[in-house]
Image (cartoon, rainbow, N blue to C red):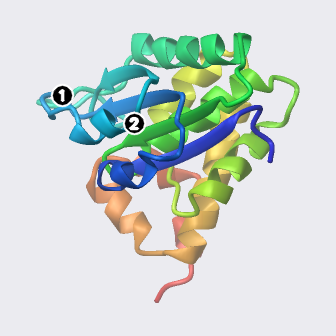
Amino acid sequence: MLAPFRITVCGIDELDEHCAAQVSHVLSILDPGWPVPSAFGGFGEHERLELRFHDVIEDQPGMTAPRLEDVASLLAFGRDMAAAPRPDAHLLVHCHAGVSRSTAAMAVILAQALPGSPAEAMFEEVLRIRPGAWPNLRIVELADALLDREGALVAAAHGVYRRQVVRRPDLVAAMRSSGRAREVATVGADRVPQC
C-alpha cells in the first residue's frame, strides 16, 4: 500500500457500506443543492470537509466547476491529516458516483502527502482501490499548479484516460458529449479499438 494512511473512495450509494470501517476523515464532494447524505450519522466521530461543485472540467452555464479555492481546501484538509497522522487514520473521499471528482481528489491528496513519489504512482494507487476511476481533469490541473508538479499529475491523469479507453472505448463519445473532450484529447481516439 502506497498511502500513508488507509484510503477509501466511493459514491453516495456506497456510503452505508463504510459506516463500520472506522473512518477518521471524510472529504465529501457533492453537487450544489444536494442534501447531505444521511449515512454520515452512522460513521461515528470523524472530521469532515464538504465541498460543492459539479463534475465538469470547463465553465458552463448553470454549472459550478471546481475552483482553485476548492482544490486548495481539499489539499489543506489532506495536509492537516498527514501532519498529525493518527495510527488509525482512514480517509474516505466520496462524490456522487465515486469515479471522477473523488478519484481526482484522492490522487492529489496522495501526491501532496508523498511529494517524492512519481505522479503515476498516485493514480496507480487510486486505480488499485477504484478500478473504474476517471479523474476530473480540472481538479488535477489546479492541484498540479498548487503543488508545483510541473504537469506531472496532468500527464499521469492522461495515462489513466488512455488505459480506461482501451478497456471501454465507449467512454470517448460519452466524455465528448458531456463537455469533457479535453480529457480524451490526448488519448488518440482515432487509434482506440472500436467495438
As shown in the figure, which amino acid type bears the numbered disc 1? Pro
Instruction: Bin the neighbour count of mark 1 within 10 Å (Cα to Cα): few under 14, some 14-19, many 20 and up.
Output: few
Where's residue 77, x and y in %?
Answer: 54, 15
Instruction: Answer with left or right where residue 40 lies relative to residue 109.
Output: left
Which residue appears at 56% of the width and 82% of the height?
Answer: 193
Which residue appears at 77% of the width and 32% of the height?
Answer: 4
Where's residue 79, x and y in %?
Answer: 64, 14
Which residue appears at 45% of the width and 49% of the height?
Answer: 18
Against 9, residue 41 (above or below) is above
As shown in the figure, which amino acid type bears the numbered disc 2? Phe
Nearest the camera: 158 or 43? 43
Instruction: Answer with left or right where residue 36 lies relative to residue 14.
Output: left
Q: Tell me where residue 60 sits by quadrant.
A: top left
Residue at the right extreme? 116
Where's residue 133, x and y in %?
Answer: 52, 55
- Residue to which mark 1 is pinned: 32
Of the image marks 1 and 2, the number of the one nearer the N terminus = 1
Q: What element carries label 1?
A: loop
Where's residue 109, x and y in %?
Answer: 62, 27
- Residue to which mark 2 is pinned: 43
Instruction: Answer with left or right where residue 2 lies relative to residue 192.
Output: right
Against 144, residue 30 (above or below) is below
Which residue appears at 72% of the width and 52% of the height?
Answer: 124
